[in-house]
Image (cartoon, rainbow, N blue to C red):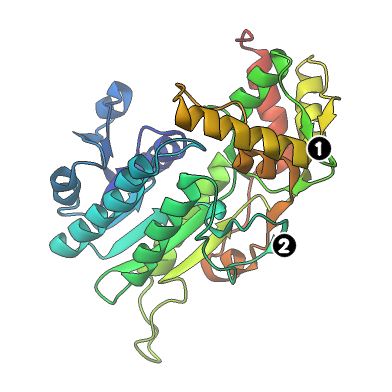
Amino acid sequence: MSTLVTGGTGFLGRRLVERLLSQGRSVTVLARRAAPDLEQRGVRFIRASLDDAAAVEAACADMTTVFHTAARVGVWGRYEDFYRTNVLGTRAILAGCRRHGVPHLVYTSTPSVVYNGRDLAGADESLPLTTNCPSPYPLTKAIAEREVLAANSPALRTVALRPHLIWGIGDPHLVPRVLARARAGRLRIVGSSRNRVDMVHVENAVDAHLLAEKAISDQPSAAGPKPPPATGRAYFITNDEPVVLWDWINGLLTALGEPPVTKAVSLRTTSTLGAVCETLWRVLPLKGEPPMTRFIAAELAKDHWFDIAAAKRELGYTPRITMAAGTSELVAHLKARPAR
């Protein structure tokens, strides 16, 4: 069974590659940089970006499954740059799958594709995809997800997963940014401090990807040619343990010997600040990401937790690593390393 993983050197992608290797599978990675340790374990590397449509299409040759985890991520940047990677890159994957007869495509989406500016409490997959968001990442991922699911057919079975706030040892984004801001004295509670948020441990997210592959690979039953229910569907993937965001952050900080965050600012003030920063960064323009955006403000203050009943029922997904176990493991790991 030959498998292609786009973004196989990223946080999620690398863990997925390692799991596939442990199963004795043949793995090819398409990524912008190589990973010599994975190459030594027999991984075939194709060094290319999603911007290179010809390379992306060619990479799909002789594959049984494509896991498309690569994307341009972030809360700030030019829409055109996000579109080129997230939409055009996904179109190249779809073209490659069709051209080379790949039967299975598992696409890594994001819950932010249903962003609507409101609290999302127990939201399920019936929510419409966003068409109005102050960040280009959710907008372009929503377009790509729609096209992946629309491409589902008897010849190419597709499924989209929406893992929420992937974390764990090796996370290069979520926890490191929280710690860096807290240690610099630049982290503030936004809003009421009681908003609940879902997260997903990286190993649980890998489980979900493998279960999704299996779900769309299952053969129709003897009763008829009806395809598996997961084909052409999207699924929220979480730890199924919503946490009070600021309690979890402060618990993590306290466990690491850092002072908890106590200063707070209203969502209205933070959103206004975000809008001002966005204007300055766009007009001047300034380098890097703004310290605040309207999208970040909403993410820090509002509920966003999800009903994963569909993933449990149709993928057989059950989170293995609990929030408590994962947090304890992460704290022990961080304590063993010097603060940065």
Position of residue 78 relative to residue 157, above or below, is above
> Closer to the camera, 211 or 89?
89
- Tell me where residue 185 appears, x and y as whole percent: 74, 15
Residue position for label 1: 266
Q: Earlier in the sequence, mark 2 or mark 1?
A: 2
Q: Amino acid at mark 2?
A: Gly
Q: Amino acid at mark 1?
A: Ser
Position of residue 208 relative to residue 12, above or below, is below
- Tell me where residue 56 appears, x and y as whole percent: 20, 46
Q: Residue at x 43, y 35 (%)?
A: 77
Image quarter in which the N terminus is found = bottom left
For numbered disc 1, what is the local secondary structure? loop
Residue lying furthest bottom: 223
Residue lying furthest top: 338
Q: Quadrant of residue 145?
A: bottom left
Disc sitting over residue 204 in the figure: none
Q: Quadrant of residue 328?
A: top right
Q: Residue at x 35, y 71 (%)?
A: 150
User: Contact, CB < 8 Å: mark 2 with mark 1?
Assistant: no
Residue position for label 2: 122
Is disc 2 surrounded by few (<14), some (14 to 19) or many (20+) residues within 10 Å?
A: few
Q: Is residue 76 visible?
A: yes
Image quarter in which the C terminus is found = top right
